[in-house]
Image (tube, helix red, strand yellow):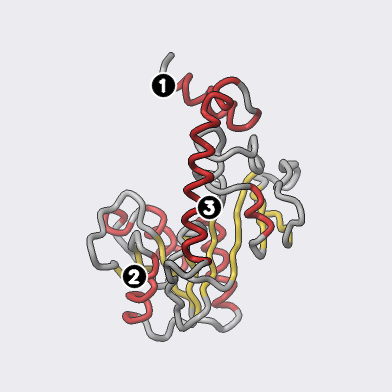
Amino acid sequence: MTAKRASTLLTRQWQHGGWLSNLLLPLSRLTAWEVARKRQRYLDGSRSAYRAPVPVVVIGNVYVGGTGKTPMVIATVEALRSRGYTPGVVSRGYGVKVGPHARVGLGQLEATRFGDEPALIARATGAPVSVHPKRALAAQALLQAHPKVDVIVSDDGLQHLALARDIEIVVQDERGVGNGRLLPAGPLREPAERLREVDVVVTNIGTPDAQPRAAGGGGRPRQVRMW
């Protein structure tokens, strides 16, 4: 089987289930255990989260891969600025070796130093951007370099519990939660029930006429569509 056919098979299984998803289900139980263990360590105080002195808005997803978070981050920054705020952005900086210290920049940033998405966000919004795998360090560096920032928008990071947050926004697309299973038997980084806890679920439906799959989880928060 070629890599392309294997990827297509896995994608189909992630949406509808099947023999391969069932075969991988024991590994998904390990993922569930690790997700629950990590979360419990913050709930019982074994680990503490960094609480920034300004509000933090996290925009992330539970479905692995791209769902439209970057345009949502850009729209959020622009909406905050139009309401008189001075937003800044933190991001992991995927694909870039940042080193021990966060990188902070403004305007035309080099994607090779900050990552493709942070560079795009900085260029599109004009907001200061700070990148580091540990988003708490990114937030601290951002506020030190730009003390006028009064709200932080986190590009991704829903599962990065070391950064305390005030608002959680999940962006999903028409795939919804797929087959509802955790990686690798399914496409989810966290259980679908996590959607009950966030503030807003934004569904990227691609076109105004598209019909998204159910978000899953039941007892949902506010639902918004985007395209």
Q: Amino acid at mark 2?
A: Leu
Residue that mark 2 sits on:
137
Around disc 3, counting alpha carbons within 10 Å, would you say few (fewer than 14), some (14 to 19), or many (20 or more)? Answer: few
Residue that mark 1 sits on:
3
Residue drawn at the location 57% of the way across and 84% of the way down: 84
Percent across and percent down for residue 62 are 56, 49
Query: Which residue is farthest top?
Result: 1
Q: Amino acid at mark 1?
A: Ala
Tell me the SS state at disc 3. Answer: helix
Q: Amino acid at mark 3?
A: Ala
Q: Nearer the viewer, mark 2 or mark 1?
A: 2
Around disc 1, counting alpha carbons within 10 Å, would you say few (fewer than 14), some (14 to 19), or many (20 or more)? Answer: few
The CA span between labels 2 and 1 is: 37 Å
Which label's residue is closer to the chain start, 3 or 1? 1
Percent across and percent down for residue 140 are 36, 76
Q: Which mark is residue 36?
A: 3
Q: Which mark is residue 110?
A: none
Around disc 2, counting alpha carbons within 10 Å, would you say few (fewer than 14), some (14 to 19), or many (20 or more)? Answer: many
The CA span between labels 3 and 1 is: 32 Å
Percent across and percent down for residue 205 are 67, 46
The CA span between labels 2 and 3 is: 24 Å
